[in-house]
Amino acid sequence: EAIHLTMFSFSTIATATENFSTKNILGEGGFGPVYKGVLEEGRQIAVKRLSKTSSQGVDEFKNEVIFITKLQHRNLVKLLGSCIRGDEKLLIYEYMPNKSLDSFIFAKTESMLLDWATRFNIIKGITHGLLYLHRDSRLRIIHRDLKASNILVDQDMNPKISDFGLARSFGGNETHANTRRVAGTYGYMAPEYALDGRFSLKTDVFSFGVLVLEIVTGKKNRGFTHPEHANNLIGHAWDVYNEGRSLDLIDASIASSFNPPEVLRSIQVGLLCVQQNARDR
Ligand code: ACK
């Protein structure tokens, strides 16, 4: 099925966002602000606007366009079209009413907390999206900035991976690459990438492990959990990713066995173990 993109006129988007009114700002994305808008026919959209001042933003913007226009999957956020006029560069996406996973995982109120069935489904959805990026032979795309704030949630609580500003594809037999510009988000970064700029598809799997850990524990990945738990969970995350096995790990009994705030080292050790797991299997 062909991907159909619309070229929007600037005035259409300006109208939809009430002239980029500050009250319509959803948040700050990788290369600029994101606005909520409503098209004339009533369709809700999210508009990413490139900040004119950022040269890194221009690269990320181009990268986003290159990748996202090739992608079509229910667990990847959908680009509807674009608008380029002079300095103005806009990308128009389907609107995700539940915004990012961040607000659910690190919920401040009880009522926002996700039940286990929903967490299970979210992990499954992210896995499918990631597998599509990694395994589709025409794609072999590494995302490189997988994290809770880049997972958007639709009205049915289905997760969609967003933000391809740092994505990179592997051609032919290429399995690894090196970069001098390590971009991404600390805390989600695989050690060999953070330290040496070396990355592969497994760099994403590491971030995926951290993400699973966060979804399961409801805690940001700093200074928490016993290393054995971290190791177990991320080991499981690898299974989930790889084979669709061990999905029953998301079980209240596991969650309740958690022994909260330990030391920062614990999680680091846990994550190093994951990396090891990923390499060994
Ligand atoms: O966590 P959020 O509310 O969800 O804050 C971020 C912010 O914009 C910067 O990325 C939100 N956002 C991004 N894309 C969309 C979208 N397609 N629909 C709804 N919100 C979005 C994101």
Image (cartoon, rainbow, N blue to C red):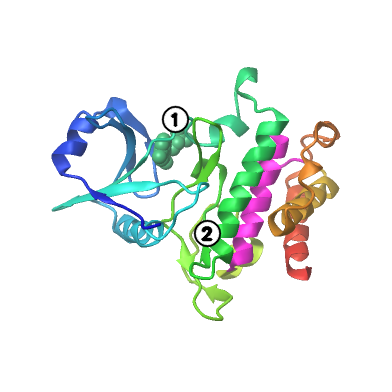
Q: Is residue 172 left or right of residue 121?
A: left
Q: Would you call the spot at circle 2 few (<14 residues within 10 Å), some (14-19), or many (20 or more)?
A: many
As shown in the figure, which amino acid type bears the numbered disc 1? Pro
Q: CA distance from mark 2 to mark 1?
A: 25 Å
As shown in the figure, which amino acid type bears the numbered disc 2? Arg
Whole-percent x, y for residue 64 in the image: 37, 57
Whole-percent x, y for residue 123 in the image: 65, 44
Residue 213: say if magenta. Answer: yes
Q: Quadrant of the N terminus?
A: bottom left
Q: Which residue is mark 1?
A: 97
Q: Which mark is residue 43?
A: none
Element assignment for label 1? loop
Cβ of mark 1 under 8 A from ligand 1: yes
Q: Which residue is mark 2?
A: 144
Start and end of the magenta stretch?
A: 200-225
Q: Quadrant of the C terminus?
A: bottom right
Q: Is residue 261 left or right of residue 131?
A: right
